[in-house]
Image (spheres, rainbow, N blue to C red):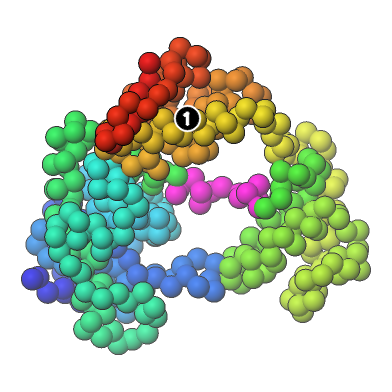
């Protein structure tokens, strides 16, 4: 078993950069601490190639911009696992996503292993290898690191390149090699979009707000996000979600109006009272043309029933094609398809599940079912897909 090289000096970092220069594929994982922070603190970077394994200590080495440039180079492929934070670190430190990326967790779901499997379970299932115990509750900011911590960190990347080969072999047999990179990039692009997205419209209870109230909520969300970033604190610690929505409903005119709400007792919030009221009043002065669109959806009564029927069909087709149903179509995807077919005003222009490989599997069967051109029945209980469309 290859022993990891611990990179904790500028000299050892330079040796690593030299070793990575010609590597076509690099396995990547990270250890970080996110609790109590606005953005996770990067504590370790684990890397693997055909020639070795490296554990990079950002707390000791300092500037790693040259490393991130190598990792995100257009010609290089990164092999990762459930890589939301890894993609976010690429964006933060390199300003870009990797040129090529394979997320082994997603790829496993596309070739019949299931989704979402943990790293330990996928290694066991695919490679018949048992990994050592977990360091889930380790505070990765503490130094020095023990040998068991370093070995645990190394195991996170030790098998990534081997997994890549096995996953592509299975994909080749199923004629879906392009799916693996396509879906990995789709996921990475979604992470990048979320980094730029203002997510105020996903707070609980927003669908019941009028447009003016939504404008106030958006202003409050922006104030909270700016404050949390400046304090390096989780946004919900600054002001809870439900309080944002309630303030948007009440639209306080003065700090006294604001502090009449329960949950506003903390000193930090009371000190910020004038800022909060100012954000509310600025939003109330916006012209109607600058307010958010309504989030209310006037769903027809048959929408739920039709979406559930399509879910049954999609699950059967996923089993038939050895694709995990969560990757093939989500409940939201199916509802969008029904809204689109019914011509509802909030429907997307072209549902995502009618595009690419998803459309090849689902498009004709689901549309024919919605149009009354096919019917579903149970054909063979012993088959992976017991349903048939006639």
Neighbor class of circle 1 (other Cα within 10 Å; few <14, some 14-19, many 20+) is: many
Q: Can residue 9 be seen at all in this image of the molecule?
A: no
Residue in the picture at 16% in, 73% down: 4
Percent x, y for residue 45? 29, 68
Asked whether 194 falls inside the magenta stretch, the response is yes
Is 102 rendered above or below residue 228?
above
Percent x, y for residue 371? 51, 14
Residue in the picture at 86% in, 55% down: 250
Is 233 rendered above or below residue 328?
below
Residue 227 picture quarter = bottom right
* Most foreground residue, 255 or 304: 304
For residue 190, side relative to residue 128 (left or right) = right
For residue 114, side relative to residue 96 (left or right) = left
Residue 296 picture quarter = top right
* Most foreground residue, 305 or 76: 305
What is the magenta range? 191-203
Percent x, y for residue 175? 19, 31
Residue marked by disc 1: 310
Quadrant of the rendering where the C terminus is positioned: top left
Is 19 rendered above or below residue 201?
below
Residue in the picture at 30% in, 45% down: 109
* Most foreground residue, 299 or 37: 299
Helix, strand or loop status at disc 1: helix
Residue 112 picture quarter = top left
Percent x, y for residue 338? 55, 26
* Most foreground residue, 329 or 230: 329
């Amino acid at each position: 078993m290859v022993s990891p090289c611990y990179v904790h000096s500028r000299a050892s970092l330079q040796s690593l950069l030299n070793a990575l220069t010609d590597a076509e594929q690099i396995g990547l994982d990270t250890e970080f601490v996110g609790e109590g922070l606005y953005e996770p603190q990067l504590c370790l970077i684990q890397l693997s190639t055909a020639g070795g394994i490296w554990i990079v200590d950002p707390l000791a080495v300092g500037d790693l911009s040259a490393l991130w440039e190598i990792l995100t180079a257009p010609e290089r492929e990164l092999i990762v696992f459930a890589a939301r934070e890894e993609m976010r670190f690429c964006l933060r430190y390199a300003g870009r996503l990797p040129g090529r990326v394979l997320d082994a967790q997603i790829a496993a779901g596309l070739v019949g292993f299931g989704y979402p499997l943990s790293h330990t379970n996928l290694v066991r299932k695919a490679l018949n290898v048992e990994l050592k115990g977990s360091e889930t509750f380790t505070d990765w900011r503490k130094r020095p690191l023990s040998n068991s911590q370093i070995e645990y960190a190394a195991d996170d990347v030790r098998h990534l390149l081997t997994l890549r080969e096995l996953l592509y072999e299975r994909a080749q047999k199923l004629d879906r090699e392009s799916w693996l990179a396509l879906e990995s990039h789709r996921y990475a692009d979604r992470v990048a979009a979320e980094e730029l997205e203002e997510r105020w419209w996903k707070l609980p209870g927003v669908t019941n707000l009028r447009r003016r109230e939504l404008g106030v909520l958006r202003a409050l969300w922006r104030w909270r996000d700016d404050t949390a970033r400046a304090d390096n604190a989780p946004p919900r610690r600054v002001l809870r979600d439900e309080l944002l929505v309630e303030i948007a409903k009440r639209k306080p005119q003065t700090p006294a109006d604001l502090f009449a709400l329960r949950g506003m007792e903390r000193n930090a919030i009371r000190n910020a009272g004038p800022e909060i009221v100012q954000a509310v009043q600025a939003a109330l002065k916006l012209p109607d043309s600058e307010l958010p669109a309504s989030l209310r959806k006037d769903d027809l009564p048959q929408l739920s029933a039709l979406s559930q029927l399509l879910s049954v069909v999609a699950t059967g087709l996923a089993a038939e094609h050895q694709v995990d149903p969560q990757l093939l179509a989500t409940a939201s995807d199916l509802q969008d398809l029904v809204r689109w077919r019914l011509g509802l005003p909030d429907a997307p222009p072209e549902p995502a599940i009618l595009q690419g490989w998803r459309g090849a599997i689902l498009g004709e069967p689901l549309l024919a079912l919605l149009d009354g051109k096919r019917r579903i029945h149970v054909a063979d209980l012993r088959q992976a897909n017991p349903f048939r469309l006639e």
